[in-house]
Amino acid sequence: MASRDEIILTTSEYDLDATLACGQAFGWERDSDGWTGVIQGRWVRLASVADGIKVHLAETSRDLVWLSGYLRTNVNIREVVATFPKDDEHLRDAVRMCAGLRLVRQDPWECLASFILSSTKQIVQIRQIVRALCERYGTAVVIPRGEASRFSFPTATQLAALSETDLRACKMGFRAPYLLAAARCVTSGEINLESVGSMKLSQAREELMKLDGVGEKIADCVLLFAYGFPTAFPVDVWVRRVLSQFYFRGRNVKPDRLRRFIERHFGPNAGYAQQYLFHHVRLTSVKKVSREQTEI
DNA sequence: AACCAGGGAGCGT
DNA sequence: ACGCTCCATGGT
């Protein structure tokens, strides 16, 4: 049968907006027709519909495993949430407020590179840097007639051939040497990103942290957002703040103690819990700021 | 205009 | 182990 370029990916309890805008992936662009992005070199536009996600492709595709694998539409989010600690009302509130927020499964190199660029940057800026990087050094993908051109995220090999000055043209500042060195480590085989996925969590974290510019937080982001380690738990300023507020009466908690609390408290899907807490605190914080501004 | 951003390296204690 | 400063850049 003739395949069409528009399909429905059936799923439920999937908040596409929250999922693609929450700061786990930086390559998605929203317009009035939905979210446009590139997955494994394929242009795709996604939009929420009643029974799932409407998928618009540039080229026909014999199956959508590459897409359902990325979006993790087969994950039963209720089963995930059911593993959260029962007596944690803060987490329950966060889940309720962020219903439908999901974790996606990104390409390891793209995720690693993006989060190397993320340090001390706001999410909007990270998106800008990533876009510049794709447009300058990525590869144009096939797009439907009339659509704006899009580029895949540059491979490690593509970036390894560049200079630090080339990268700085994308406004990444002091992160440029980190990204360049990482690209060259991956290209030379000094680090094997594929092998990281089969390691134990602690070993995988150590492996990623061998890279200059990759500390615990960035390593955990890659382990959670690309490799799908379910207990990886990135702790950034927002998460530190919300954990302190919810579980330590707002006290400043030392890193070691915080790490032990996380491992004991959140259970086998701690990474999802982290994302709910992160998204929740950012939503409430942004709301507070805009309210302050309108009241003045 | 000043402040701060999904951090990390390189120090010193 | 913790705490501090610096790093480059731009958005609110």
Image (cartoon, coloured by chain):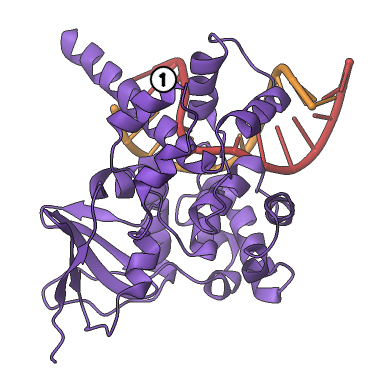
Chain colours: A purple, B red, C orange
Q: Is residue A36 above or below residue A58?
A: above
Which residue of the protein is positioned furthest toward the bottom in this rendering? Answer: A1
Residue shown at 59% from the left, 10% from the top: A251
In the rendered view of the protein, which quadrant contains the N terminus of chain A?
Answer: bottom left
Between A262 and A193, the one nearer to me in the picture: A262
> Disc 1 marks which amino acid?
Glu
Q: Is residue A68 visible?
A: yes
Q: Is A279 left or right of A52, judged from the image as shown?
A: right
Residue with the mark numbered 1: A89
Residue at image coords 25%, 50%: A16
Give the residue drawn at x 48%, y 27%: A238
Indicate the quadrant where residue A4 lies.
Answer: bottom left
Q: Quadrant of residue A135?
A: bottom left
Q: Taking A214 as reference, is A187 above or below it?
A: below
Q: Residue at x 32, y 22 (%)?
A: A284
Quadrant into which the C terminus of chain A falls: top left
Q: Is residue A81 above or below residue A25?
A: above
Instruction: Indicate the position of residue A28 as horizontal and vertical percent values.
Output: 30, 56
Mark 1 falls on what kind of element?
helix
Q: Residues within 10 Å of mark 1 (few under 14, many from 20)?
A: few
Quarter of the image for residue A286 reads top left
Decide if residue A121 is in sight here. no
Give the x, y percent position of residue A266.
Answer: 55, 33
User: Which sits in the foreground, A57 or A51?
Assistant: A51
Q: Horizontal and vertical percent for residue A233?
A: 57, 40
